[in-house]
Image: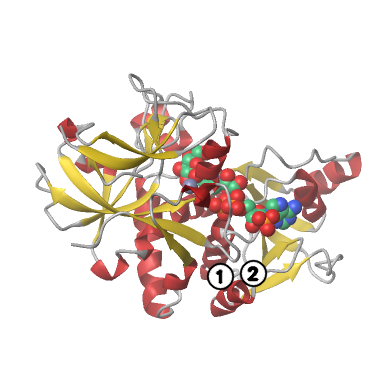
Amino acid sequence: MSQIGALITHPPSEGVEFARIEGEIGKDKGIKVRTLYTGICGTDRGIVRGALKFAYDPSGFDFQVLGHECIGQVESSNSDIFKKGDLVVPLVRRPGDCPNCRIGRPDNCSDGNKHEAGITGLHGFMREYFYEEAKNLVPVKNKDLAKIAVLTEPLKNVVKAFEVFEKVSSRSIFQNEFSTNEGKNALIIGSANEAFLYSFVAREYGFETYMANRHPIEDSKLEMCANFGVKFVDYSKDVNFPTNFGLDLIIDTSGDPSTIVRFLRKATYNAVVILFGTNGRAPDGVITGADIDWIVERNITICGSVDAARIHYEKALDLIQKWHLAHPGVMDRMITGIFKPEETNIFTVKPTGEIKSVIKWNELG
Ligand code: DN4
Ligand code: BGC
Ligand code: ZN
């Protein structure tokens, strides 16, 4: 039996190691995919830190292969849909048996009985190759995207959150008199990968878009903001931001309650607030009676959004393709570091200026 290199974890215990594992796990799924790149995100780091108590090994295994952000290339296939050489992005979440899972929306799973590759009870993609079924693979038609389509998975979360925004904002007239979002203000809290992707999509929607953190960000990140017309705010200096306008859309990627409440009080009539960041380590915050009054009197909607469905992966890929054409070379700069699988310290030490760190597994064939 063939052995392959893989990054394995033992959730919910901490740690990660580059080990040799059985290569033919899941062979009956039929499509063999050579991993090209896997992305590293806060969820992976949380698992490695032992902080994600909901993560667990697949049944019958005493380890879980890490990794849910991936682009790979089909090596062999038993399906008419995919052939050798095709580029694919695998889905993270696999349905359970609830009504939402049964209609192809496991992202809205209503009983928690879904599984997530590399997170909850299903091996992930940080290995030299893996096997998948056609229904869990999204095709990537353009070979030029062989590296940057690793951003499809984190971007699909953003596309879904904007679907949530569209649903809740339709309860009243949200847009301006020309039925656009021009003149409306969006604030994205945080300045890591998901915050960048949120900012870019907010610009697609026509929002005046601000990204905020409590410290300055590197020039390379400021440049990335400028490419998309996003304004960065260091609110430790600009303490009253925003002073002369209200926020129509707030998206939080920090998971910090005090920061969320701080900006909630700047939300305007019919504003939408989407909570996306989860950060068990942030200090507790306080929400006052005056905050509640503010929210109620202005019809402000606060909602959570997690994961996304196949349709959002497809839309995310369309956006990556569009941005790749509209901003030549810029999407490549979202990938700020390429690492070897053995370099496991990347899970514990975030490189300076990181937007997205990726691990390279194989050359494009
Ligand atoms: P991340 O590094 O976890 O991003 C967190 C960002 O928030 C960093 O830029 C932090 O800055 C920033 N931040 C922390 N505290 C504050 C604060 N008080 N004010 C302003 N900014 C702050 O990486 P990510 O972009 O991959 O993920 C963002 C969040 O989304 C994480 O909590 C993930 O767990 C969560 N997530 C959710 C889903 C989902 O719901 C999917 C993927 C990720 P700094 O302190 O590092 O400078 O489906
Ligand atoms: C993934 C989501 C997943 C979530 C679980 C994120 O990093 O992008 O697909 O549902 O982690 O917390
Ligand atoms: Zn992730």
Is the CB of mark 2 within 8 Å of ligand 1?
no
Q: Secondary structure at mark 1?
A: helix
Q: Quadrant of the N terminus?
A: top left
Q: Are marks 1 and 2 in contact (CB under 8 Å)?
A: yes
Residue 208 relative to residue 234: left or right: left
Relative depth, front residue between 97 and 103:
97
- Dot 1, crowdedness within 10 Å: few (<14), some or many (≥20)? some
Residue 47, placed above or below residue 342: above
The dot on residue 203 is 1
Q: Position of residue 19 (x, y in %)?
A: 35, 38
Residue ID at (38%, 64%)? 148
Relative depth, front residue between 263 and 17:
17
- Residue marked by disc 2: 209
Q: Position of residue 265 (x, y in %)?
A: 82, 54
Q: Is residue 357 visible?
A: yes
Residue 279 relative to residue 55: left or right: right
Residue ID at (34%, 29%)? 102
Residue ID at (74%, 42%)? 282
Relative depth, front residue between 152 and 292:
152
Q: Position of residue 230 (x, y in %)?
A: 62, 73
- Dot 2, crowdedness within 10 Å: few (<14), some or many (≥20)? many
Decide which of tag 1 and tag 2 comes sooner along the chain.
1
Is the CB of mark 1 within 8 Å of ligand 1?
no
Question: For the residue marked with disc 1, what is the amino acid?
Answer: Arg
Residue 333, placed above or below residue 272: below
State the count of labels: 2
Distance between mark 1 and mark 2 Cα atoms: 6 Å
Question: For the residue marked with disc 2, what is the amino acid?
Answer: Thr
Q: Quadrant of the C terminus?
A: bottom left
Residue ID at (46%, 31%)? 109
Residue 160, placed above or below residue 182: above
